[in-house]
Image (cartoon, rainbow, N blue to C red):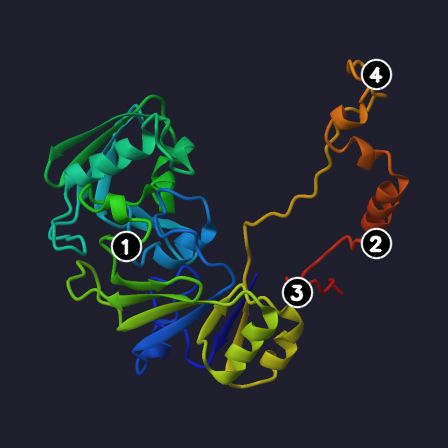
Amino acid sequence: MKQLFSGPALATFAAAAVMNVSAVLAAQTSITVGMQLEPPNLDPTGGAAAAIDEVVYANVFEGLTRYQADGSVAPALAKSWTISDDGLVYTFSLHSGVKFHDGSAMDAEDVKFSLDRARAEDSTNAQKRLFTGIASVDAVDALTVKITLSNPDGGFITNLAWGDAVIVAPESIENAKTAPVGTGPFTFSRWVQGDRVELARNPDYWGDAVALEKATFKFISDPTAAFAAMMAGDIDAFPGYPAPETLPQFEADPRFRVIVGSTEGETILSTNNKGREPVRCAHPAGDCARHRPAGHHRRRDVRLWHAHRHAFRAAPSRLCRSDGRVCA
């Protein structure tokens, strides 16, 4: 994955899921981040699109734990926790003085509501599997939560760092898709659909204040438009920059930094393998062509197999650059 940063771009934008380079944003009070895809909604507990987390994870919403830039997991709304000897009971101590953006206090009851909602039978959480091992969630007191598992799970603390496990307020959940209310360092300002999402610094944030007053996520899917926006200075940073063929131009320009990162994304090419055997016509009207298994005609088109064969033969055995350049 390519991240493209212009000048002293991303800096202390600690909430950006891409990178933190805190020293360089001292004089900059706003940032505009380019994104290829617009999120379908802004509720990370109700959608699978990665673009949702790119805007709101650790910016607007927070969980008990959180992912660091290096992939490790650190405390977030939970300042500490203990684990029972049998690995079944996790007791979390919450930070005091945490408020949702609507001014209401965040406490253990909100944690219980969020996790019970995520694991409910009618849950629409895209990662519901993360919560299936939870047997019960109890609010011991305002700042203490006890979570009991059905079986020991060494990855449970990591599961709680997912965007799907952020803590939400019961009072605001109905509008979370379009007007999210969380506990993070940025509050939601507005969403101009088809164009951008704007966030503003949360003056009442419980943690360390961010240097930025405003963050804008600008949606630009067209590679040519993305290139033009970067060159014009309309975009400060563009994680997953969509025009890798132009990277040498940015690498040669002292105004820009090109950072090569990694990704857990996968692209899968699959073929429907059902119905390999000759189709025996049992249709009463003799109309078997309309009732063959999906992909039947494509598998029997020799041109498809030739295309696949040549494509895989031509594929390089090693790719070291995310722009497709082969290792030397």
Q: Are marks 2 and 3 in contact (CB under 8 Å)?
A: no
Residue at image position (29%, 78%) is 29
Q: Which residue is mark 3?
A: 323
Q: Are marks 4 and 1 in contact (CB under 8 Å)?
A: no
- In the displayed structure, would residue 263 be above or below residue 232? above
Earlier in the chain: of badge 2 and badge 1, it is: 1
**Quadrant in the picture for residue 324:** bottom right
- 39 left or right of 89? right
Whether residue 121 is visible to the viewer of this picture, yes or no, is yes
Which one is earlier in the sequence, the residue at label 3 or at label 1? 1
Q: Could you classify mark 3 by the number of other residues whose Cα lies within 10 Å: few (under 14), some (14-19), or many (20 or more)?
A: some
Question: Mark 4, mark 1: which one is toward the viewer?
Answer: 4
| Residue to which mark 2 is pinned | 314
Identify whether 60 is placed above or below 254: above
Judging depth in this view, the residue of 218 and 319 nearest the camera is 218
Residue 153 coordinates in the image, percent (x, y):
38, 29
Q: Which residue is mark 4?
A: 280
The residue drawn where x is 77% and y is 24% is 275
Q: Residue lying farthest bottom?
A: 254
Report which residue position mark 1 lands on. Answer: 179
Q: Amino acid at mark 4?
A: Arg
The mark nearer the N terminus, 2 or 3, is: 2
Type of amino acid at the residue the image marks with label 1:
Ala
Q: In the rendered image, which quarter contains the N terminus?
A: bottom right
Relative to 18, 26 lies left or right:
left
